[in-house]
Amino acid sequence: MVKVITYGTYDLLHQGHINLLRRAKELGDYLIVGVTSDSFDKNRGKLNVCNNVLERVEAVKATGYADEVIIEDYLGQKIDDVQKYDVDIFAIGSDWEGKFDYLNEYCKVVYLPRTEGISSTMLREEKNANYRIGVVGSGRIAYRFVPESKVVNGAEVTTVMNPYKENVETFAQIYGLRAYTDYDQFLQNVDLVYVASPHLTHYDYTKRALLADKHVLCEIPFMLTKKQALELYCLAEERNLVLMEASKTAYCPAFGHIVTLVKSGIIGDVVDVKASLSKMVVSPTRELDSEQAGGAMTEHSPLTLLAIIKLLGVDWKDVDFRSRVENGVDIYTKGVINYPHATASFTLGVGVKTEGNLVISGTKGYIYVPAPWWLTDFFEVRYEDQTKNKKYFYSYDGEGLRYEIREFVSMVVNNRRSCYKLRRRESVAIAEIIEKYRNHENVTEI
Ligand code: CTP
């Protein structure tokens, strides 16, 4: 019996897949089809697969060509499968010509003709209207956002706005975008708005975009008061629009897994969360400018508060801050947040350097996420009995902004107002703590 094996994602199964499976089956007597798992696709940067693995397996089975369907879950698995299933022929479409020659050592490799004019990517693009994203602001984060958006289907950055003509034109030229210095004109030419402007302008730009019926993704610090955050989430809800805080760590795969592992009790009851984040900067810069709401708290607390609030919730009892202030800006802030049955602290610096790690302590063990924890790609669950320790590794692709952009576009496409990765009430709680600090409540200078 001649055994053939082939692999693919088989998203939105189409005629090209069917032709390929038929040709592969014709090469032998028994066809094994490897369908990629959802996590494997995500890890290799395929972020926009529409059907989940069960749907894709069912679709492959329904073609009637597969004698057996297996799941492909890791890089290098093909070599294992070919040997494990005693495969004679590995077959794949000609778009992969040459890429699997290394399997010749284990079986015969055949590249089959690919069907022209159709692909899952094409179908996904047709399915998702291509939304026009407009970027407000052309600073450092905006420069990182545009390349990241290119790996997300369904939306494309087309437009940029900045009241300063020279800045906006340079940015527009680099990325081939339309440039505006007038916000109202800009709003008329976009579907989705990414607010990446100076902190103090977030509220106004976001509100005006919502009033113009645009969905908004707003950079951190999202809002500087609880009232602003609540008002804008209500406005978005009333107008049936997506409003999302661009807290990138919230949407990255490893951080999401830390939260679910903790919630499932792997380290027992959480008693303490410690999160630190420091980035040294040199004047003159926005981070050290009191007129632009600079300082460690506004710059860095949103991500550390995200970790604390995701893990311990929004029902904290009190919060207390210690800051080193220079020229009206906190170059270092330590905050302690007390909960009825737990405590949390965050340490932030723009002019003081600290170790940027995250430690979550529980009654059975703890989770250690090394610096820079906010770009999580690795963490370890540790116990008293070290033989039980477990390390977890993840991919954190590119600048990591692709995960939040994908979530934002998915919320718009699927008409979802809320996202469990960062709930609106959690985002409001973050704004409330920042507000307390800015109002000097329980702040002691050191
Ligand atoms: N395939 C094909 N003809 C097409 C599309 C895909 O022969 N028009 C083959 C691929 O070469 C591969 C198999 O179908 O052997 C599964 O490919 P997959 O990556 O799932 O399909 P694509 O449509 O290429 O998906 P994407 O656009 O996401 O890359």
Image (spheres, rainbow, N blue to C red):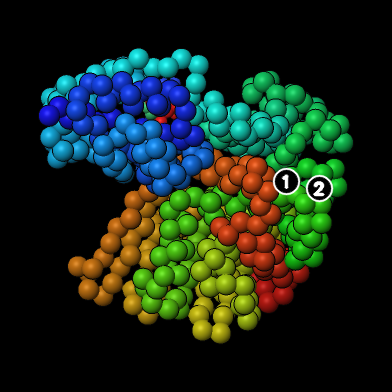
Report the Cα–Cα distance between label 2 and label 1. Answer: 7 Å
Circle on res. 216: 1
Q: In which quarter of the image is ligand 1?
A: top left
What residue lies at 45% left-to-right and 24% top-to-bottom? Answer: 15
Q: Which of 332 and 49 is in front in this view?
A: 49
Residue 268 percent across, percent down from the top left: 38, 77
Q: In which quarter of the image is the C terminus?
A: bottom right
Q: Mark 2 points at which residue?
A: 210
Q: Residues within 10 Å of mark 1 (few under 14, many from 20)?
A: many
Up-down relation of residue 176 to residue 163 (above or below): above
Q: Is residue 127 visible?
A: yes
Q: What residue type is labelled 1?
A: Val
Q: Which residue occupies 28% across, 62% down? A: 390
At 26% from the left and 65% from the top, the residue drawn is 389
- Ligand 1 contact, mark 1 (Cβ < 8 Å): no
Asked if the residue at tag 1 contacts the one at tag 2, i.e. Cβ–Cβ closer than 8 Å, the answer is yes
Label 2, residues with CA under 10 Å away: few <14, some 14-19, many ≥20: many
Where disc 1 sits, the SS reads strand
Q: Quadrant of residue 123 in the image?
A: top right
**Is 89 left or right of 237, judged from the image as shown?**
left
Residue 294 pos. (x, y %): 69, 53
Q: Which mark is residue 18?
A: none
Towards the viewer: 415 or 367: 415
Q: Which residue lies furthest to the bottom in this view?
A: 340
What element does badge 2 sit on? helix
User: Residue, x 37% and y 63% (percent of image)?
Assistant: 368
Q: Where is residue 125 in the image (x, y as percent from the top left)?
A: 59, 29
Classify mark 2 as within 8 Å of ligand 1 or not, answering yes or no: no
**Amino acid residing under circle 2:** Leu
Could you tell which of marks 2 and 1 lies nearer the N-terminus? Answer: 2
Residue 278 versus residue 220: which sits nearer the camera?
220
Image-based side of 186 in relation to 7, left or right: right
